[in-house]
Amino acid sequence: MPTYTIGAEQIPSQSHIAIENNDGTITAKHAKITVINQTELWIEDNKSTNGTFVNGMRIKAIAVKRGDIVQLAQHNITPNISKIFDNNVIIIGEAFKKHIESLTKIHMNYQQNMIKIKRDHAIKTNGIRTVISLIFAGGSYAVSKQFGVTNALGSVATILGGTIGYLISSKEIPDEKINILNKKFQQEYTCPACKASLGQTVPKFLEQNGHGCTRFRPF
Ligand SMILES: [Zn+2]
């Protein structure tokens, strides 16, 4: 079980939680915390000067659940306690399967939306190309008529005009919608335990292997 000290001492360590903005009332290693399981921590006052409080009661040692108000002297450290719970969440078995289901939905929606954006974009681009091609073709036809060129020459000019119009309009138009979609996907497609982005890992792979962290895995 992970154990921590918590207090005013500002030396960064895996096993110490430093409380900043201290006014001198918090002791260096004010309290000790032991993770019992995902829903309970054990907190023990470490002979502090100003005491440790849980839900307003000064304590020597007590079990703490998520949502309990924890104070070192007058300082509310409940957010730090929530973080300890978050860092010790383990998602395995049935809960893992449920999360894989919702991640699969997120991944499917992403792919479907990407296809839709690209299809709409193609329709739009081709539409513009057709319009520009027609304008060029029409222009060429008008010019050849003006100069009284023969029908055959006029047709060649019309086709040429259309082709030039098509080439001019065939440049790729960057699509802001794709950027927005990618950003949203990055935010939603994350590990429910460690919150890391799952990148391009497909759900089928996740289902069998997890994504590398030990807190979100099949068993
Ligand atoms: Zn993870």
Image (cartoon, helix red, strand yellow):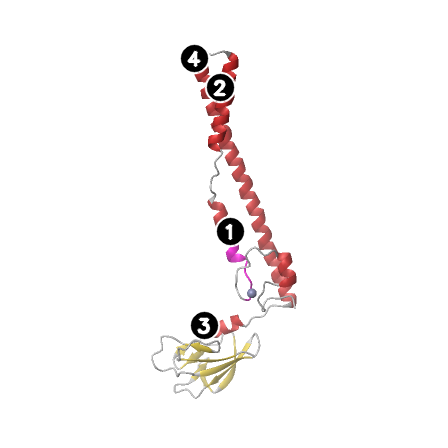
Label ID, residue 79: 3
Secondary structure of the residue carrying tag 4 is: loop
Viewer-side residue, 147 vs 77: 147
Cβ of disc 1 within 8 Å of ligand 1? no
Question: Considering the image in quadrants, where does the C terminus appear?
Answer: bottom right
Q: Which residue is mark 2?
A: 157
Q: What mark, if any, has residue 147 been given in the picture?
A: 4
Quickly name the residue at label 1.
182
Magenta residues, start to end: 182-193
- Going by the image, does 154 lie left or right of 106? left
Instruction: Please tell me which residue is depicted at 46% across the width and 45% down the height of the picture.
Output: 176
Disc marking residue 129: none
- Residue 175 percent location from the top left of the image: 48, 43
Amino acid type of the residue tagged 1 in the rendering: Asn
Disc 4 and disc 3 in contact, CB within 8 angstroms: no
When asked about the image quadrant of residue 189, the answer is bottom right
Q: Earlier in the sequence, mark 2 or mark 1?
A: 2
Q: CA distance from mark 1 to mark 4?
A: 54 Å
- As helix, strand or loop, the secondary structure at mark 1 comes to helix
- Disc 4 residue type? Phe
Where does residue 133 sit, x and y in percent of width and height? 49, 26
Earlier sequence position, callout 2 versus callout 3: 3
